[in-house]
Amino acid sequence: MPPPYRLTLYDADGASDARADAGRQAAERRFRQVLDASLGDAHLVWPVYSAYQRIVATHGEAPDPDALTEAELAVFTQWQAAEQAAIHAVFGPHRHLGDAVFDLQP
């Protein structure tokens, strides 16, 4: 069964040889595993991510927690924690949320 979402990590240096591609695929698998585990199930990743994107579009990247509903705050913090865990798992603890370049699609 195919995964319920597509994930693409982008290599900062643009390398595309076979070894780099194999490394990127392994990194994508690890990133996906951590997102899935952090959010509880692979089928929750896309809905949580798309809800997070809507919250950011409405309230900005660093919204005032008091401006969010309880549900929005839960989704916002849950996605940021899952994304940070995945980034740390793949890139190490010295990478930050704004440094990772990835794309999620349904």
Image: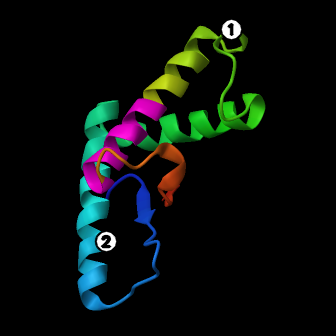
How would you classify the magenta stretch by its main secondary structure? helix
Q: Residue at x 26, y 48 (%)?
A: 89
Residue highlighted by disc 1: 66
Residue stretch in magenta: 80-91
Residue type at numbered disc 2 = Arg
Q: Position of residue 42 (x, y in %)?
A: 32, 43
Q: Residue 81 location, x and y as percent?
A: 40, 31
- Does residue 105 sit above or below 21 in this rendering? above
Q: Secondary structure at mark 1?
A: helix
* Residue 51 sits above or below residue 96 on the image: above
Instruction: Place residue 69 in its image quadrant.
Output: top right
Image point 68% across, 24% down: which residue? Answer: 63
The residue singled out by tag 2 in the image is 24
How many numbered circles does the render carry? 2
Label for residue 23? none
- Of 37 and 16, the residue lying toward us: 16
Residue 70 in the image: x percent, y percent?
58, 9
Q: Position of residue 62 (x, y in %)?
A: 66, 29
Q: Earlier in the sequence, mark 1 or mark 2?
A: 2
Residue 61 image-quadrant placement: top right
| Residue 70 part of the magenta segment | no
Vertical relation: 64 (above or below) 34: above
